[in-house]
Image (cartoon, grey):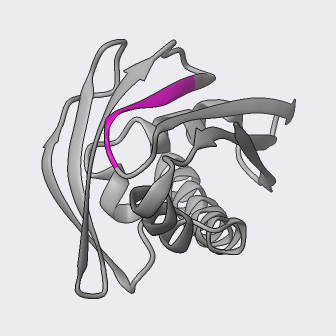
Amino acid sequence: MSVFEFRFQVSAPVDVVSEFHFQRGILKKLSPPLMYMQVHRFDPLADGSIGDFTMWMGPVPVHWTAQHQNVSSTSFTDVQIHGPMKSWQHTHTFRAIDEQQCEVHERIEFEHDSGLRGLWSRLLFPQPALFLLFCWRAFVTRRACAALLRSRQS
């Protein structure tokens, strides 16, 4: 089992960061420009809700179905039901640093299949690519939360 962890700070209270992550269409918002996200089903975030989507990595479609578990206002976990990995469990945690700052902790526990299928997932999801993906998500999260704060103050 491999583990990928990524942490970043957001200049917003934890409830704003949580609100951003609970929005409809969040998956598309968090996807980098070169990755087209085709959402087939994405239930409102709750225990047992399903996300079913195809990520287009250039001309390559990667179909994925995940179920949300342990959903609270400060964390939730996506567990792969069907997808490119042997297993994938992604936990998002939001922790208040103080009243105006939050830390987002992304932890992914995953395992590749063996053989050609495992080679394919290793090529699609190497550690450097995950790092770049989460750098993009940190950027988007910070911008979106700043916009949410401005809209609350208006």
Q: Position of residue 126 (x, y in %)?
A: 63, 68
Residue 115, can we see it? yes
What x and y, as percent, mark residue 9? 81, 53
Of helix, strand and loop, which mostly describes the magenta segment?
strand
Count of numbered labels shown in the rendering: 0
- At 53% across and 73% down in the image, what residue appears? 123
- Residue extending farthest to the right is 98
| Among the 4 quarters of the image, the one containing residue 38 | bottom left
Give me the residue at 56% from left, 65% from top: 122
Q: Is 34 placed left or right of 37 in the picture? A: right
In this rendering, would 118 be left or right of 52?
right
Q: Quadrant of the N terminus?
A: top right
Residue sitting nearer the eye, 77 or 95: 77
Residue 78 place in picture, x, y as percent: 46, 31
Is residue 55 positioned above or below 123 on the image? above
Q: Is residue 30 visible?
A: no
Q: Residue furthest front?
A: 115
Above or below — where is 8 with respect to 95? below
Magenta stretch encompasses residue 11: no
Q: Is residue 36 left or right of residue 78?
A: left
Q: Position of residue 115 (x, y in %)?
A: 47, 57
Q: Is residue 50 left or right of residue 23?
A: left
Could you say which is closer to the camera, residue 30 or residue 50?
A: 50
Q: Residue at x 54, y 48 (%)?
A: 112
The span picked out in magenta is 76-83
Query: Is 132 in front, or is 126?
Result: 126
* Nearer to us in this view, 146 or 154: 146
